[in-house]
Image (cartoon, rainbow, N blue to C red):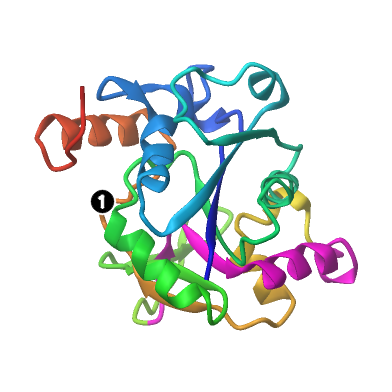
Amino acid sequence: MRVGAVIVAAGRGRRFGDGRPKQFVELGGAPVLAWSVRAFAAHPEVERVVVVLSPARAAAPPAWLPEGVTVVPGGVARADSVRAGVGALAEEIDVVLVHDGARPFPSAALISRVIGSAGRGPVIPVIGIEDTVKRVDGRGRVAETVPREDLRRVQTPQGFPREVLARTHALGDGAAWAEHDAASLTDDAMLCELLGIDVATVEGDPSNLKITTPGDLAIARRMVESGVIPGGT
């Protein structure tokens, strides 16, 4: 089994709030994206790493990217960027990990768990929900309490046999997406769900947080400064 990773980082990060793409904000002496890339570039089971950037950034890739990393321009929607990244992987790669560049702390153990299952079919890392979950109506009032026993929060990297990932994207251009705006397709596992392809789960990692808001960045910085996450400069 030969493994490649596609790190999606072409988004503009509108929710971050200060006009900067969140994946390029400084964290522990390096951009958020640098942490994500290093995790996969250093993993002994990952042979190839492709980073998908906006067309402007792809035209002048950051100098801090590790040697051997391939950079390609992304598309308007996330699915377009994933297709571009997968297309840049060498033909011999038969398992693809897809990771969000705004998740800087994927551990080697987490990556290994995903790889260990991905050869058999699509797999996503998940963690349980400890808080009580409420469904709220359009007026902001509680409509119901949602049972949380079967609910999970989903992380990346998500792993796929390459042929399955390619097939979901090819089929996704047709009727399966007819009722879905491309922007609403938030991960590749959702494409599998829409097409009736089973998706397995493995244990996620609470430290593998996604940076979406300045508050998330503050948490990540504290994790580095406290030594919970090693490697800060």
Q: Callout 1, which amino acid?
A: Ser
Query: In which image quadrant can residue 76 be found?
Result: top right
Q: Which residues are magenta?
A: 150-178
* x and y percentages locating residue 153 in the rendered image: 40, 64
**Drawn side of residue 120 relative to residue 173, left or right:** left
Residue nearer the viewer, 126 or 9: 9
| Residue 211 is at least partly visible in this image | no
Q: Quadrant of the C terminus?
A: top left
**Drawn side of residue 141 relative to residue 186, left or right:** left
Residue nearer the viewer, 75 or 45: 45
Query: In which image quadrant can residue 34 be found?
Result: top left
* x and y percentages locating residue 104 in the rendered image: 36, 40
The residue furthest right is: 174
* x and y percentages locating residue 158 in the rendered image: 50, 62
Q: Is residue 179 above or below residue 151?
A: above
- Asked if the magenta segment contains residue 161, the reply would be yes
In percent of the image, x 33 and y 36: which residue is there? 216
- Asked if the magenta segment contains residue 220, the reply would be no
In percent of the image, x 25 and y 67: which residue is there? 130
Q: Is residue 12 above or below residue 78?
A: above
Please give the residue where the numbered disc 1 appears in the rendered image. 207
* x and y percentages locating residue 99 in the rendered image: 50, 50
Asked which secondary structure carries label 1, the reply is loop
In percent of the image, x 60 and y 83: which residue is there? 198
Report crowding for label 1: few under 14, some 14 to 19, many 20 or more residues within 10 A (C-alpha).
Answer: some
| Residue 225 is at least partly visible in this image | yes
In percent of the image, x 52 and y 19: which residue is there? 62
Residue nearer the viewer, 214 or 162: 162
**Drawn side of residue 107 relative to residue 154, left or right:** left
Residue nearer the viewer, 54 or 21: 54
